[in-house]
Image (cartoon, rainbow, N blue to C red):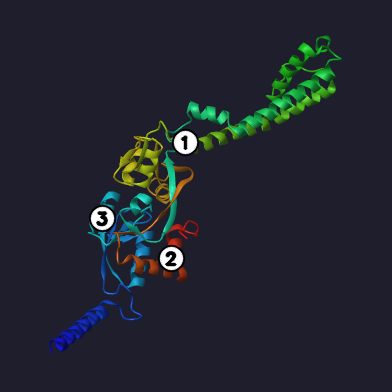
Amino acid sequence: MFAWRGLSAAFLMAALLGSATAQEKAPAGEAPLAGKTLIVATRLLPPFVVKRDGALSGFSVDLWNALAREAGAQTQFEEVATLPEMLEAVKERKADLAISAISITSQREEAFDFSQPIFDSGLQIMVRPSGDAGGFSLGGIWRAATSAPVLNLLAVLAALVLLLAHIVWFFDRRHEEKHKPYFPGIFRAMYWSVGAAGGQQPFAPHSAFARFLGALSVFTSTIVVAYFTAAVTSAMTVNQLKSDISGPGDLPGRKVATVVGSTSATYLRQLRINAKEFPTIAEACNSLISQETDAVVYDSPVLLNYVDNEGKGQAIVTGEIFRHEAYGILFPPASAVRKPLDEALLKLRENGAYEEIYKKWFGAVGSAAQ
């Protein structure tokens, strides 16, 4: 009797557990996160997270909204001010995940889980234009005078002066006794050649051919001087737009700004560069514009967005991208929502939705994570 009752209780318990499990599983064809509201931590970081008229947008926000629709989840955004606050919100499980422009690193992988990469990025350097003080500095003039175009032009002019001097000496040495020896005759001919190239002739040569060359030199001197002036001006303009900081190797000894807790801050410490770390990229950029610092090292797309908008005309991005890295969605360890969202991300790539979001914020597809 007791055995029958025990068996009946066991069957009843199994039926109840099976019923509960069936209720937990989403019905076939239903979105995997249907009915769930996910708390998403984020921070303002154009062009990834932008706030306009009180509403959040940007590449990362648009991508997340598409992922949430695909997975059937509802969203509650929690906006924080800094990167460490965003990481802390996920670590303390006050948020289910975080999305903005979060680099996937081995150090972060020890404490968090990441989605598949959502964007390929890298570090770059932002500086002030070297001519931002206005006018031409002595340093700028020297750099222009020693630039390759100007030096090449001077070399051509020197060759022409020497050629003209030798022609004049060769034809004029038969008419004047002191021109017969090569030295000092050639120096006198060079003196005349330089004067002719400048539009003036210190003395008149005797031979008809030399006089013809002199007249031709005076005629062309205006063109030569105009071309030389244009070359110098162009070189000085280019030098104004360039900076003497073009890569990480130029940073030692400079005042460098970056963002606290970022991969750029870690990278600079590895280079033994004592950078000033600001809570936000906006503060780091302001330090550059106010001449408190000489350069900002941070994520390339963020710096490029800044120089095209708030910092237009006041800052430039210099050099190539270095230390390539990928962004991902940040989860607490063993998150139950990571796998459904990874599957949703794959679907967005397959159906072209990811590409459309990328084009909206960055133009042609080229740096998107593959």
In the displayed structure image, the side of residue 209 where residue 127 appears, left or right: left
x then y, percent, for residue 96: 27, 62
Say which mark, if any, is on residue 249: 1
Is 174 drawn above or below residue 304 in the view shown? Answer: above
Q: Look at discs 3 and 2 and give the one toward the viewer.
A: 3
Closer to the chain start, of discs 1 and 2, is 1
Say which mark, if any, is on residue 91: 3
Say which mark, if any, is on residue 354: 2
Which amino acid type is shown beneath numbered disc 1?
Gly
Closer to the chain start, of discs 3 and 2, is 3
Q: Say few, some or many: other residues with alpha carbon within 10 Å of mark 3 (under 14 / 14 to 19 / 20 or more).
A: some
Which amino acid type is shown beneath numbered disc 3?
Lys
Which amino acid type is shown beneath numbered disc 2?
Tyr
Which residue in the rendered view is the most extreme toward the right?
Answer: 174
Q: Nearer the viewer, residue 278 or 311?
A: 278
Residue 47 lies in what quarter of the image?
Answer: bottom left
Secondary structure of the residue carrying numbered label 2: helix
x then y, percent, for residue 270: 39, 39
Verify CB contact (< 8 Å) between mark 1 and mark 2.
no
Q: Say few, some or many: other residues with alpha carbon within 10 Å of mark 2 (under 14 / 14 to 19 / 20 or more).
A: many
Q: Look at discs 1 and 3 and give the one toward the viewer.
A: 3
Secondary structure of the residue carrying numbered label 1: helix
